[in-house]
Amino acid sequence: MSNPRRHLLELAPLDATELLHLLDLAESFQDISQRRIKKVPALRGMTVVLLFLEASTRTRTSFELAAKRLSADTLSITGGTSSVVKGETLLDTARNLEAMSPDIIVLRHRHSGSPHLLSRHIDASIVNAGDGGHEHPTQGLLDALTIRQHKRRIEGLKVAIIGDIAHSRVARSNIVCLNRLGAEVVVCGPPTMLPPDIESLGCRATSDRADAVQDADVVMMLRIQKERMTEELFPTDREYAMRFGLDRAALRMAKPDALVMHPGPINRGVEISPEVADGPQSIILDQVANGIAVRMAVLFHCAGGGAQA
Ligand code: CP
């Protein structure tokens, strides 16, 4: 039987077995990036379109490297250089790309649900590279992989996610993924940045930084997403940093071997101090490195490779 079309639209529908399958697959791809010739023929002859209609550094480049390391042909389209600026709709853009027979379209878009829309109308596999404030599934997977590699487990860990939870697709993907893999997830931010229904995803919410950080195994800091705000949600960056930022003193409340994470881009001195971002407990650049292996796994899976997750 031929494989059904596979997408990765969000982590919410995946169970622990499916999540672990993708993490294990990513781990199996990791050594390719350490070789002198960083290429395997797994996706030779396939075409991956990177349709990034919202800004990105890490996600776009690591998807491109991931596709190239699997020997796929890649086509990169960004917002400013596409005909979207001339008024073309997302669906028309995707239908025109589809006429060129891509196998996978990786989409980043400012509107929640955009990848789901494409998956209903386009024949190619669709991978969500971040849709508005909804989900960022490959970020959730790479964060879980990075935690697992440093702590040798995820189950039973206390993970504090601190920042602009309301606008964060990274928070949503991490909450569902880490909760499903057995972590205790606590989210923290100003009351204006904590959606009332957030605990239904499988976390506890607090506006008390000490409560979140106390005895945490992992402290994940998030950027304030001013570009998604329609009103001021906190008085000043300085006040925010004092109450919700992570500096050395705040980090001392966590376990001594706590990991410091951040999906990037960082606003130094706002949500995280430079000495913590660059300090010995920071694994921020490990997250970036793991992004390639995770995206190789996701592309390989969506192309029909490996067991059904
Ligand atoms: N973490 C993340 O999504 O970063 P970019 O916006 O640079 O892709």
Image (cartoon, grey):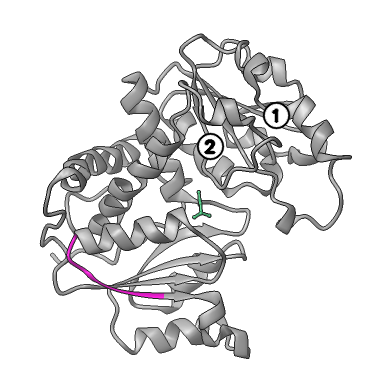
Q: How many marks?
A: 2
Measuring 29% from the left and 59% from the top, which residue is drawn there? 65
Q: Which range of residues does the magenta coloring cover?
A: 70-76
Towards the viewer: 205 or 277: 277
Give the quarter of the image for residue 181: top left
Measuring 31% from the left and 87% from the top, which residue is drawn there? 100
The mark found on residue 245 in the picture is 1
Where the N terminus falls, by quadrant? bottom left
Picture coordinates of residue 250, whole percent (x, y): 67, 17
Give the quarter of the image for residue 146: top left
Picture coordinates of residue 2, whole percent (x, y): 15, 67
Q: Is residue 262 magenta?
A: no
Near mark 2 (Cα within 10 A), the count class, few <14, some 14-19 or many ≥20, is: many
Q: Is mark 1 within 8 Å of ligand 1?
A: no
Q: Is residue 169 left or right of residue 73?
A: right
Residue at which label 2 appears:
262
Above/below status of 271 relative to 42: above
Measuring 41% from the left and 49% from the top, which residue is drawn there? 138
